[in-house]
Amino acid sequence: RVGPMQALLVLLTVSSAAALSLVANGARTLQPPAIQTGRKAAVQSAGRRAAVVLQEDLNTKTVIKDAEKKLKKSLASVTEQLSTIRVGRATSDMLDRVQVEYYGAPTPLNQLASVTTPSASQLVVDAYDKSCLGDIERALMESDLGMTPNNDGNVIRLNVPSLTAERRKELAKTASKIGEEGKVALRNVRRDAIDKIKKMQKDGLSEDESRDAQDELQKSLKKYESEIDSSVSQREKEIMTI
C-alpha cells in the first residue's frame, strides 16, 4: 500500500513532467484554438497580399517590355523607310518601298526581282518571274520615285535623274512625313500600353504602381521620338546637300 507522502510525491512528479512537456512543445499549445486559427489566417492573408503585389509588378513589367519591343520596331520601320529616299546617286534600296500587285496581293518589289546599279545614274530591275514585269512597271510608274521605267521585255531600266532643288524639297517633305507617321505609331503603342495599365488598376493595381508604369512608358516614348527626329533631320540634311 502507498502512504500519503508517497502518493503526494508521485503526483508532483507527474505534474512536473506534464509542465515540461508543455514547454517543450511550445507555448502555442496553451493558446485557445480561436487564437491559433486567427494567427494562421493572418499569415495566409499576408502571403496572398505579397503574391498580389508580386503579380502586379510582373504584369506591369510585361506590359512595358512588350511596348518597348513595339517602339523599337516602329523606329526600325522609320529608319528603313528613310533609307529608301535617294540623296543623289542610284542605290538598290531606293526601290524597297515599292509595292507590286502580284496575284492580287501587295508584295515588296525586292521579293519579286533583283535590283542592280550598273552606273551611278541607272537602276536595273530583273524580275524572277518575267510574267510580272508589267505589274512591276506599273508599280514603278505609280510610285513617288519620279523615274520613268523602261521595260524591254526582259528587264526594266530606270534612269535616275539629277535632283533639282525642287525635287530635293519634295524628298525632304517625304522624309518629314515618314517621321511624323512614325511618331504617330509610337504614340499608339504608348496609348495601348497605358490602356492596359489602367485596366489593371481597375482590377486592383495600386495607384502608385500604375503611375510609375505610365511614367516609364512616357520616358520610352520621348526617347524614341527623339531618335526619329534625329534620323529625319540627318536624312533631310543629306537630301538637301548638293
Image (cartoon, rainbow, N blue to C red):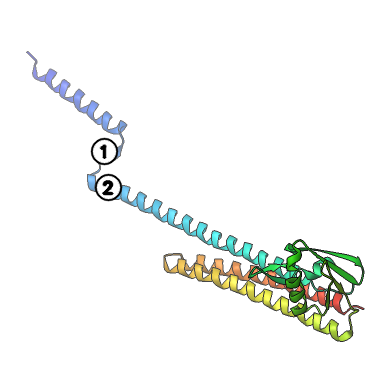
Q: Nearer the viewer, mark 2 or mark 1?
A: 2
Q: Is residue 100 visible?
A: yes
Residue most toward the left?
1
Q: For this rendering, which residue is in front, 17 or 133? A: 133
- Rendered residue at 75%/71% (across/down): 136
Q: Position of residue 78 (x, y in %)?
A: 72, 70
| Amino acid type shown at disc 2 | Thr
| Amino acid type shown at disc 1 | Thr
Residue 147 sits above or below residue 119 on the image: below
- Rendered residue at 23%/44% (across/down): 33
Q: Is residue 98 visible?
A: no
The quarter in which the N terminus is drawn is top left
Residue 187 sits above or below residue 58 on the image: below
Circle 1: element type: helix
Q: In terms of image quadrants, where is residue 148?
A: bottom right
Mark seen at residue 29 = 1
- Rendered residue at 26%/33% (across/down): 22
Mark seen at residue 171 = none
Q: Residues within 10 Å of mark 2 (few under 14, many from 20)?
A: few
Is 211 left, or right, of 121 in this rendering? left
Q: Are marks 2 and 1 in contact (CB under 8 Å)?
A: no
Circle 2: element type: helix
Q: For this rendering, which residue is in front, 52 or 145? A: 145
Q: Which residue is mark 2?
A: 37
The quarter in which the C terminus is drawn is bottom right
State the separation of the CA atoms marked 2 and 1. 12 Å
Residue 39 sits above or below residue 26 on the image: below
Q: Return the disc, 2 or 1, that comes first in the chain's sequence.
A: 1
Is 96 left, or right, of 44 in this rendering? right
- Rendered residue at 68%/67% (across/down): 107
Q: Position of residue 16 (x, y in %)?
A: 23, 27
